[in-house]
Amino acid sequence: MDKNQVIDKLNDCLRHEWTGVAQYAQAGFVVSGLWRDVYSEMFYDSAKESFGHAKKVGEKIVALGGVPTVERNNIKQSDDLLELLNAALEFESKAVKCYLEALAAAEGDRALVIFLEDILKDEQDGVDELTRILRNPSAVAASTGSKTKAG
């Protein structure tokens, strides 16, 4: 295991989690319509989860001798529920990819692998939940008055 490579991969994951905090909070702020209470709470809970992951990853980076990043990636913004849910699915899918890359770099350090697998499970659960919600995008759109886009 190359510790510097692991720290770099963990900082990639941390940058992604900081993005999640902002993107999910923004979605919680702007979501509207009949299902606002349900989806705003879901987005706020996702922001809290991203912050929890950021905290764990940042602490692990310091434990490994690195410096946690304070940067984040660009966030996707919309006030359309279907677009917000699709952006969330894209975010969670990228998180899975990020943690898989960190896992590959951590090979040989069993404790670090378990640490990353625990977070990866949360991210995959997010992908699965959003996939189930988006299984019928026209129903999501109909419940909010959104217009679906072909494609």
Image (cartoon, rainbow, N blue to C red):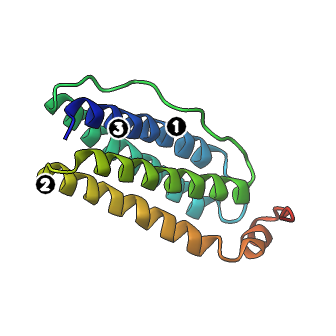
Mark linked to residue 110? 2
Which quarter of the picture shows residue 51?
top left
Q: Which residue is drawn at 23% across and 46% down?
A: 106
* Residue 57 x/y as whole percent: 28, 40
Based on the displayed image, in which of its 4 quarters is residue 138 positioned?
bottom right
Q: Which amino acid does label 3 sit on?
A: Lys
User: Which residue in the protein does label 1 denote?
Assistant: 22
Q: Count numbered badges in the picture.
A: 3
Q: 119 and 29: which one is in front? A: 119
Front residue of this view, candidates 136 and 38: 136
37 is higher (above) or lower (below) than 66: below
Q: Which residue is drawn at 72% across and 45% down?
A: 78
Disc 2 is placed on an element classified as: helix
- First reached walking from the N terminus: tag 1 or tag 3: 3
Q: In which quarter of the image is the N terminus?
A: top left
Which of marks 3 and 2 precedes in the sequence?
3
Q: Please rate how many residues cluster around mark 1, counting C-alpha atoms within 10 Å: few if below 14, some from 14 to 19, many from 20.
A: many
Q: In this view, does 32 lie to the left or right of 18?
A: right
Cα distance between the residues tagged 1 and 3 = 20 Å
Write the residue at 33% across / 31% down: 8
**Which mark is nearer the camera, 1 or 3?**
3
Residue 112 image offset from top left, x and y in percent: 18, 49
Q: Circle 3 is placed at which residue position? A: 9
Residue type at mark 1?
Ala
